Every structure is written in C-alpha cells, then in structure tokens.
Amino acid sequence: MSPSATAPEPFDLLGVGLGPFNLSLAALADGVPGVRAVFLEQQDAFHWHPGLLLDGTTLQVPFLADLVTLIDPTSRWSFLSYLREHDRLFRFYFYERFHLPRREYDDYCRWVAQSLGSTRFGARVDAVRWRPGSELFEVTVSGPHAGGPTAGGPTAGGPRDPASGPREIAGGPDESAPRVLTARNLVLGLGTEPVVPPAFAGVRGRRVFHSADFRGQRDQLAGARHVTVVGSGQSGAEVFAELLRAQPSTGQSLAWITRTPAFAPMEYSKLGLEQFTPDYVRYFHGLDQPTKDATVPGQWQLYKGIDAQTIGEIYDLLYERSIGGTDADALLLPNVSVEAVSQPGADHAHALRLRCRHRAQHREFTVDTDAVVLATGYAPRRPTLLDPVGGLLHLDPGGRFRVDDRYRLATAAEVTGRIYVQNAELHTHGVGAPDLGLGAWRAAVILDDLTGGRAHRLPPPTAFTTFGAPEPPRAAAPDGAPDAAAAGAAGAAGAAGVATGSIPVQPAEAGGAGR
C-alpha cells in the first residue's frame, strides 16, 4: 500500500481509547504484517485506576493475565519481558507471588504504551462518521498529538524509543488543530465511568466522592468524625480496610453499607473460575437475551465479590479492636440501600443524613455521617463521538449495542467497515467482559476476524466444564467419507474468526517483524 500524495493512507484499524484492552490489541497487532493500526487516547499518558493504586493492593488475576501472554507468551510485550527490561526478573522470582501489585501492573502497561509505535496520547476523538462512497470511517481528532504515523512513514507496528515522545502525523504548524483521519475499521475501547447513585447526585463534592478518586481525595476526609463507605466490591473493601487501618490515628467512626446480601468473597474456586474462559463466553453468547439478562445479576460473586485476604484483614482488625470489650466503632450493613441523602444543617452533629432501607426486612432507618466514599461501580461510556453514526447502529430494545461473537457491532447494511467493541458487551458475552484474564483472547479474536484468521492461533476449547447440553456422540464416518467431527470443527473455527473481506496478510519477510 502506498499513501496518496495528498492524503495519508487510511488505517486498517483505528482504536478509540487506550485502556488495558485496546492496549492488548495494539500489542498483539504489533508485527502482524499488512495491518496498519493506530490507537488514540485523550489523556496525556497511560493511567489505570490511579485513585485505587493503594500500597499493598494487587490484581485479582495472576500475572499471566497480562496484555499478551495467554495468546502469545513469546511476545516482547509480556510482563516477563517488562521485568527483564527493568532488571527485575530475579526480584520477582524471589517475590514468589502470582498476583501483581497494582502499581506494577500500571507501570508495566505504561511501558508498553510508551514503547509501541501505534499509540497516540493527547489525541481526543471528537466524532466518527461513515462515508459510504469511500467505504471509510472519518474520525475527527483534536489535541496536541491529534494524528497517526506520518504519511508514508512506518506502519504502526514498529516500536519506538519511549523517550522520543509521541509520533505525530504530518500536518500544519498548529498540531492541536482538529484533523480528520480515515480508517477501514474501528475498535472502541472507551472504558467505563464511575457510577454515582441518584441519592448522592445533589451532595457530591469535597467530602462525597467516588472511590475512583480515593487516592487523590483522601486528604479531604481529614477532620471528619464519621466516614461511610457505600458499596462492597473489591474497591469498597479496600477503601474500608484503608480507613480501618488508619482509625487509631484518625479517631474516625466508620460505616460500610452495601446493597448486596453479604460481604462475600469472590468466587475463586478452580472450576468456578472456568466461567472466565473462552468456552463460557461462547456458551453465554449463544443464549437468548432474556436468559442472559436474568443470569448476570446472579453471578455477582464472580465480579463484585471481595478477595479472601482483604476480608480476612478486615475481620482481624475488627477482632483486635474489640479485645477487652472495646467497641470496634465500625458499623457493617449488608442488604441495605441508601434511598436519600439530606444535609441537616450547621446545628446538627454530622453533615449528612443517609436515609436507608433494609431490603429484606423492608425497614427504614438513618445513618448520620460527615463524609461518604462511593464504591458504587462503573458503567460503560456512551460518548457523543458516536452521535453521527447513531442512526446506523442496531440496538436492542434496552438501547444497548448488539454485539456478535467476534465483538462487532450490528450496523446498517451500508456500513461495510467493522466497529469492534471491548468491555461494552457484558450483556451479550457475560461476566468475563471486564476481566483482564480474557483481554488478550478477545483482542486475538478481533485480529483473527480482521485478518481472515492469520494473526494468532486461537486456543481450542480448554474448560473441563461442559456449560451447555452435551452434544450426542457422533457415529464413525465410513471409510473414504469426510469426517463429520473434523468438518464441524472447521466450520466452528470459521464462524469464530474467518470472515470475508478481511485484510490480506502478506507472508513476513526473512528477518522482518512478522511471526
């Protein structure tokens, strides 16, 4: 492909957003011949949940769930390669932990993001349009680095020196001026945004904030006599544990309120974790939508539970504080929802009054507090950048994306380009959608679809659990007849990844970057 003399050549794939999932796709696309890709992010650098990078906190998945290893353990972008690059292999060897510190995972991802040639930070996507005449997406981009590789320059697969800064597209003197990039296909990795319950919308401020901001806002809690944590997932537990550890020095009374029936551990049994395998994703995607919608809420311990170590530490602290009949000065309230919040006034002992309701007893009561940390989860972003193509997207009755088994949005027939999504498909693909352990596999499925099955080898079924009804045994094929099982497997493989109109992939030259 050679670029036009007047305009940069279209990208084969343009990614919007650079969280771990699109970063995984960028890393796995690196070196795949024939794929010209760029990934744009409006932030100035990679940051992964900075408000929750607390000392002592770890990922809830093993280090093998990095950006690439479960698909390509030989990749230069693996976590072990990061350790080698930073001379930390022996230290990690003696660390003897399977789960990474969150701060190290964040640093690892930032190293990959700064080293890849296809990533652009400080580039905000403002609008996406489909041009049927050229069969291309037009993407309006602004920001200090609003561009892709220079026209005629290297494909986006090449690495770069992290100290060299972002590579910019050839353009005029004002690099921050909006410009238009074109792409044959898009992948949306827009991530999620913090959810603030309606009851707290009117009081959010200095002392009422989401746990996503906890690290930066924690100092605002100084002087509060009573602090309440709302929400009991891992984030809520870590915030509560952090406040509980500091309680002897702060003197703060604490409350922990959650709608879930219990402060329960995350499902971490080996067979239970098979619900985070490609096998389960394929099974779940084949269910009808009403069944999917009824199933996900009942799986809350798979993605809203708390790791056993954090629960154990909280209990141990409460136990030690209660020795000798001392009041632990902490109120734990499961199965309780906060219905409304009021501000009683300056003459009241506390700044906020929470009107609560016990969901099983149907009884109302109040909790008075001075500050609230909302560990109330996240929801997929629905940005305005999609508004120009909104009429071309086919949504379900609930206004959600329809997503096929290869992570493509359902669109009008006139849209011949593909729009892939990452972590916007909980309702279609199940609880594994936000799980880091499935990120590399999903990225490989997208690349497999994009290239006609020539990017990476997808793993065969590996779960010991048979999630659906077992298939009846097949009769042996007569001599000379095609083997039905082999034919069925080939058909399934085609349905999983090979599509017409995919990018032709050229064989890698000797000594080149291709695999």
Image (tube, rainbow, N blue to C red):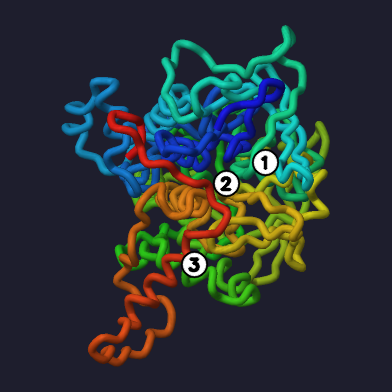
Whether the residues at callouts 1 and 2 have beta carbons within 8 Å, the answer is yes
**Residue at the spot of label 1:** 369
Residue 179, x across and y down, in percent: 75, 24
Q: Earlier in the sequence, mark 3 or mark 1?
A: 1
Q: From the top left corner, tell me how far across and down residue 109 is, in percent.
A: 43, 31
Give whichever of discs 1 and 2 has the lower sequence position: 2
Q: Amino acid at mark 3?
A: Ala
Find disc 3 in the rendering and name its residue.
495
Is tag 2's residue or tag 3's residue first in the polypeptide sequence? 2
Residue 449 to residue 252: above or below: below
Question: Which residue occupies the foreground of this view, 354 or 44?
Answer: 44
In this rendering, does residue 435 appear at all? Answer: no
- Secondary structure under badge 1? strand
**Residue drawn at point x = 43 percent, y = 19 percent:** 160
Q: Which mark is residue 255?
A: 2
Please tell me whether mark 2 sits on a helix, a strand or a loop: strand
Disc assigned to residue 67? none
Find residue 200 and report its horizontal and vertical position in percent: 75, 45
In the image, 380 versus 58, the foreground residue is 380
Classify 465 as above or below 500.
below
